[in-house]
Amino acid sequence: MLTASEPEQPPLRLIDTHVHLHLAQFDADRDAVLVRAAAAGVQHMIEIGYDLPSSRAAVHLAAQHGPISAVVGIQPNHVHELPPDWHAQLYDLLRQPNVVALGEIGLDYHWMKAPPEQQAAVFREQLAMARELDLPVVIHCRAAAADTLALLRADGQGVRGVMHSFSGDWAFAEACLELGFGLSFSGPVTFRNATDLHTVVQRAPAAALLAETDSPYLCPHPHRGQRNEPAFVRYVVARIAALRGEALEAVSAQLWHNAHTIFRILHT
């Protein structure tokens, strides 16, 4: 978090496009976390679901806090837990107020908690839902770049969205950009040795960039190893600005515009 020893910072307009504030890691100080986020210039946050219970929690949190929107969906590491009526439950959640996207969805071959075929089937079904409801998607891709791209090309026509916590190289980034997806960067972009991410930030068009914390995970430098929180998105935005050689205020404004364009959040 920002400390008293750090210099006073100019006001910025920031949006954290991916948080999990409903988790137990925030039960003791959730309200204080929101206060610190506002003090750091974070004017909006997007609470992301990854299964049915967390999606319901996201909708509830968005209903309780004006600066929060909700995203609901089934992440690949949870597809094996789905009840038979998951389609109906998810459709109901997608129609709730303050829901701005379907996610996080995709493929994960790192943890492989469900076989690739099951992950792909649920991914395809959710892409169809997103197309039907005209919603953007938030994509989770881990160790599955080739299959994610292939599936999006085959089944994601007309679907737009964001590659969450982008962690690939320029070739993968370029393919995502060709599909019309934004690239959202999290704490690892602030790490000195994340040279592939640095290259992507430098080469990608400004209109494709977003920033997130993935709180409570992936804490950025200089707080690496701590619990992450939305106030720290400022470090991600600052690193993006430094890598591109652009003013922090200009980059924060661009990222605000990009997020609001993709998610259609009606805030001026």
Image: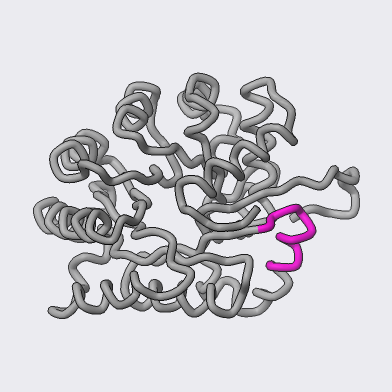
Q: Which residues are magenta?
A: 34-43
Number of marks: 0
Question: 103 above or below 82?
Answer: above
* Lateral position of residue 215 relative to residue 183, left or right: right
Colouring style: one colour
Q: Residue at x 27, y 57 (%)?
A: 130
Question: Which quadrant holds residue 4?
Answer: bottom right
Q: Which of the two residues, 81 or 13, is positioned nearer the viewer here?
A: 13
Q: Is residue 217 inside the magenta stretch?
A: no
Q: Residue at x 28, y 61 (%)?
A: 133
Q: How far across and how far down the image is residue 139, in percent?
A: 34, 49
Q: Main secondary structure of the magenta part?
A: helix
Q: Which of the two residues, 39 or 263, is positioned nearer the viewer here?
A: 263
Q: How far across and how far down the image is residue 27, in percent?
A: 60, 79
Q: Report the quarter where the N terminus lies.
A: bottom right
* Lateral position of residue 65 relative to residue 158, left or right: right
Q: Is residue 36 inside the magenta stretch?
A: yes
Q: Residue at x 68, y 42 (%)?
A: 235
Q: How far across and how far down the image is residue 265, in percent?
A: 53, 57
* Lateral position of residue 113 relative to residue 161, left or right: left
Q: How far across and how far down the image is residue 13, in percent?
A: 71, 48
Q: Residue at x 22, y 59 (%)?
A: 132
